[in-house]
Image: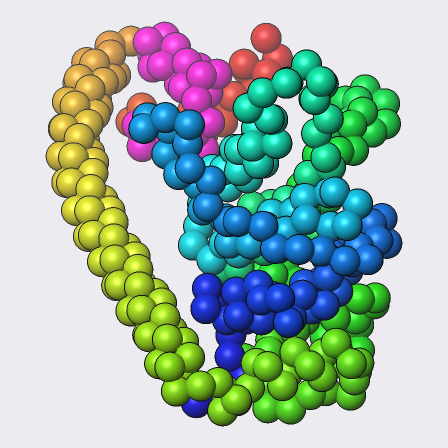
Amino acid sequence: MARYIDLLTDFAFKKIFGSEPNKELLMSLLHAVFRGQKHLSDMVYDKNEYVGDSKDMGTVIFDLTCSAKDGSKYIIEVQRSNQYNLKKRMLYYSSRLIADQAPKRDRQKWNFNIPPIGVVAIIDGFVISDSKSGYVHDVCLCNKDSGVVFYSGLEFVYLELDLFLKQPEDLDGDLDHWMYVLKHLSKLNHLPEFLNQTVFERLFDLAEFTNLTKEEQFMYNTEVKRRRDQENTTYYQINEAKKKARKEARKEAKEEGLVARREGREEGREEGREEGKLEGKLEGKLEGKLEVKTEIVRNLLSKYDFTDVQICDMAKVTLDFVKEVRANSGKE
């Protein structure tokens, strides 16, 4: 049993970052994520369930949502299973949060006074980019030609833990420290010296498994077991798919080999027939006059890359005869 819980489980993430007594931890994480671009003096947790205006419009449930004192709003999501449409989903989430700001009445007076919206996606277990682009992607609306920011009120930050490969001695800044904790906490057995800060001391204390209540321990273990079962099922399915693919590949290769051998035999028989015809013609001509033999040797010398010995054998003449024809051909 690990000493500390996995922060990226749904239970642990909401317990550590989603409760009022621990909001300083979430504020510290967001400060690190936005790297000094935002200063959050205080924040309140918002509802995380947004019901559609009609039955046809589904309900959206965020992992965490909160509002800062300056009115800016944030969505924090943890994604551990591969999502090919993750970017679109985050865009949809932000759209639902933006649309929810519109008042039911007096929209003209409101005049689209939309607060700044920030979406933070913590990604574990898969990647959405290549390693060259780094493990942090800070995205906003910008001019494609100049790269100048066009609108900074809608911002997306993607954190890819699988691409975060730094060792403790390589950590640089608050975001690196938080990335290291999010990725490695459940593998540690004590608070490292390089994380000796008040915020991390509190985090490690809250995340210690023995400090959970019996009910919380049961909830956490249940989720971990469910995740491991899912991983084992996925691993089994992937292995079975690989086995099936290898079996089909072997079968296809075998069939192609049989076809190739069959075609090879047919080509060999055809070549044999052609060679037989050629030999018959050669033998017929060799029975003729000396001029015919000379012409045959000359053709073999000019059109094919045969040695004199090979031509001797094919044309049924002496080596001296071939050399004489070669010498005369050169003179001509």
Q: Position of residue 185 (x, y in %)?
A: 60, 78
User: In the figure, is residue 205 to the left or right of 13?
Assistant: right
Is residue 78 part of the magenta span, yes or no? no
Q: Please tell me whether the stretch drawn in magenta is mainly helix, strand or loop.
A: helix
Instruction: Work out whether 61 lies above or below 160.
Output: above
- The residue at 82%/57% (across/down) is 41
- The residue at 36%/14% (across/down) is 296
- The residue at 77%/22% (across/down) is 144
Is residue 301 part of the magenta span, yes or no? yes
- The answer to whether residue 265 shows anywhere in this view is no
Instruction: Work out whether 66 lies above or below 320.
Output: below
User: In the figure, is residue 275 to the left or right of 149?
Assistant: left
Instruction: Work out whether 77 lies above or below 113.
Output: below
Q: Position of residue 103 (x, y in %)?
A: 60, 26
- The residue at 46%/64% (across/down) is 10
Instruction: Work out whether 317 lies above or below 86.
Output: above
Q: Which quadrant: the N terminus?
A: bottom left
Asked which quadrant contains residue 29, the reply is bottom right
- The answer to whether residue 42 shows anywhere in this view is yes
Q: Position of residue 96 (x, y in %)?
A: 53, 33
User: In the figure, is residue 295 to the left or right of 79?
Assistant: left
Tell which residue pokes out farthest to the front in this image.
106
Q: Nearer the viewer, residue 259 or 212?
A: 212
Q: Nearer the viewer, residue 209 or 305?
A: 209
User: In the figure, is residue 285 to the left or right of 217?
Assistant: left
Asked which quadrant contains residue 298, the reply is top left
Please state the extent of the stretch shown in magenta in the rendering: 290-314
Q: Nearer the viewer, residue 24 or 233?
A: 24
Q: Nearer the viewer, residue 35 or 76?
A: 76
Q: Position of residue 149 (x, y in %)?
A: 83, 29
